[in-house]
Image: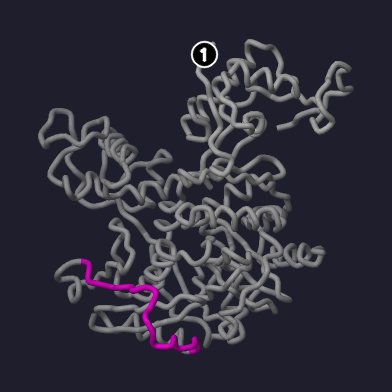
């Protein structure tokens, strides 16, 4: 499990819009629009205080609020989502 | 260029230059009732130019270009020059218009509210809009609907309606012959005839309307009606917009406002009359 | 995605009342791993469909060269390669060939080579916008 930390971009780097069935994120620095479904909006929400988190720390925050299923699998998923978000520029490696 | 014509359609003005006179004569006749744009600078230039050195005279062949062009455009025969001019104007709008979010959609207005219909070529959106325009609705456009970035209103782009193949006979049965253009046979999209919008639609081409319903029409063997989820609507409208990405954040704001405030339905219909019946019923059910 | 409510709240949940009730989040499994779809520019689609478009195989800048079975452009005379197509293909012809038909005037292998060339077209190469316009889903 990586100890790479991730931090959300500044709050005003993205504009969000909630739809009935998914969320939309407009990322100002890139001009890109992303359509996102759970658990991405929830992950981003948990990073909203700007803290630099490892996947494990983020997982543990999420586990307080949500039932994430078996820990090993969930940790791997969180790490994969963070890597994807970093590739898109929606979070930064810290 | 040798021959010139300036046209105003909705908020846009075009200066069309042509190496040949015939297409511009046809255009001028069909657009005769449109207000003359007030002699200022045109938004766009369209040029119908010979596709090769000899192609001005020998088997004349038109290459469509202008302020905006696509290098892989196929040349068109002079007989289809009217169509070439129309495509040239569409291309300028699709590639160059930034004052509104451009949706590949038809639209009609009633009681100050707009019905927007979006879909691929052949979905029936143009024919439906033309029919509604002949049956009491105001035609705002058959190809492009313009979404105002600040107010969320839909504005008209009431060019000549482009009718293809069977739609020609359908509309010719409902509209007077003086508003039908010449038959352009054997184009890449089949036979085409143009319909001039009614005088009231032309007169009101500067007036917007609040969008009240979005429809995805499709020909199908059985009449059917489905709700469409907002996520799917958003995705399909980004695909139906030529300038969503270029507009950046204002585009995002305008499109999300539209998607979250305008109810959407997909309708399948076996005939134009069936489609109109479904549309009228849905419209009457609006609050 | 459905997220069934988990009730009742666990007794030891000491977080403040603003916290939403516990929910199950689908974390992958049957669902695709990526929960993000990014919007791609639709410019190529709608603008090119507004015009009839054509694709030269290969593009005119490389008209004298040949097409390898993989679709790469190679020098004329390369063994196993096919000569460039005499005339450009229309969007319609390419569309139906992509669905299992044959580009006009081509034998089977030549058709495959040409289609591979078309699939490899990149933004900036002549023919790309036409090809891209054929790709957009219904």
Q: Would you say A2 lies left or right of B269 here?
A: left
Horizontal and vertical percent position of residue B260 = 69, 53
- Is residue C44 inside the magenta stretch? no
Q: Chain of mark 1?
A: A
Boundaries of the magenta span: B33-51
**Quarter of the figure with residue B287:** bottom right
Looking at this view, name the residue that lies furthest to the left: C77
Determine which residue is flagged by label 1: A2
* Residue A9 horizontal/vertical position (percent): 53, 36
Residue at (65% x, 34% y) in the render: A41
Task: Compare residues A59 and C93 and report the one nearer the observer.
Answer: A59
- Horizontal and vertical percent position of residue C89: 30, 51
Q: What residue lies at 56% left-to-right and 20% top-to-bottom?
A: A79
In this picture, is A86 found above or below A55?
below
Asked which secondary structure carries label 1, the reply is loop
**On the rendered image, what quadrant is the N terminus of chain B found in?**
bottom left
């Amino acid at each position: 499990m990586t100890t790479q930390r991730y931090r959300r971009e500044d709050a005003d780097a993205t504009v969000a819009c909630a739809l009935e069935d998914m969320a939309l994120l407009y990322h100002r620095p890139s001009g890109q629009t992303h359509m996102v479904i759970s658990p991405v909006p929830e992950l981003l929400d948990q990073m909203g205080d700007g803290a630099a988190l490892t996947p494990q720390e983020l997982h543990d925050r999420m586990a307080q609020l949500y039932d994430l299923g078996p820990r090993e699998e969930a940790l791997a998923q969180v790490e994969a989502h963070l890597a994807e978000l970093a590739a898109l520029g929606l979070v930064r490696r810290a | 260029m040798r021959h010139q014509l300036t046209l105003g359609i909705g908020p846009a003005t075009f200066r069309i230059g042509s190496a040949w006179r015939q297409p511009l004569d046809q255009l001028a006749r069909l657009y005769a009732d449109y207000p003359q744009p007030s002699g200022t600078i045109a938004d766009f230039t369209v040029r119908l130019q010979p596709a090769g050195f000899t192609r001005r005279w020998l088997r004349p062949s038109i290459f469509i270009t202008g302020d905006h062009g696509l290098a892989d455009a196929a040349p068109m025969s002079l007989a289809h020059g009217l169509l070439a001019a129309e495509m040239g104007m569409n291309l300028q709008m699709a590639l160059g218009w930034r004052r509104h979010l451009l949706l590949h959609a038809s639209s009609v207005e009633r009681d100050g509210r707009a019905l927007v219909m979006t879909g691929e070529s052949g979905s029936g959106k143009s024919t439906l809009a033309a029919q509604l325009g002949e049956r009491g609705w105001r035609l705002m456009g058959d190809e492009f609907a313009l979404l105002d970035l600040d107010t969320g209103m839909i504005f008209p782009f009431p060019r000549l309606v482009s009718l293809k193949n069977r739609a020609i006979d359908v509309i010719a049965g409902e509209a007077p012959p003086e508003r039908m253009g010449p038959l352009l046979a054997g184009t890449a999209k089949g036979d085409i005839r143009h319909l001039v919008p009614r005088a009231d639609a032309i007169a009101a081409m500067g007036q917007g309307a609040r969008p009240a319903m979005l429809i995805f029409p499709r020909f199908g063997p059985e009449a059917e009606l489905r709700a469409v989820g907002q996520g799917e609507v958003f995705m399909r409208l980004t695909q139906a917009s030529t300038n969503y990405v270029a507009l950046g954040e204002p585009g995002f704001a305008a499109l999300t406002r539209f998607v979250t405030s305008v109810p959407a339905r997909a309708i399948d219909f076996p005939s134009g009359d069936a489609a109109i019946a479904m549309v009228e019923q849905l419209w009457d059910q609006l609050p | 995605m459905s997220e069934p409510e988990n009730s009742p709240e666990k007794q030891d949940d000491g977080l403040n009342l603003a916290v939403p009730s516990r929910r199950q989040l689908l974390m992958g499994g049957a669902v695709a791993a990526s929960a993000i779809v990014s919007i791609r520019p639709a410019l190529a689609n709608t603008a090119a469909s507004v015009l009839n478009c054509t694709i030269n195989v290969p593009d005119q800048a490389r008209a004298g060269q040949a097409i390898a079975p993989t679709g790469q452009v190679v020098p004329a005379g390369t063994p196993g390669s096919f000569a460039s197509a005499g005339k450009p293909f229309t969007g319609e012809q390419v569309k139906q060939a992509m669905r299992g038909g044959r580009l006009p005037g081509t034998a089977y292998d030549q058709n495959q080579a040409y289609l591979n060339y078309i699939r490899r077209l990149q933004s900036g190469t002549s023919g790309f916008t036409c090809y891209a316009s054929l790709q957009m889903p219904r």
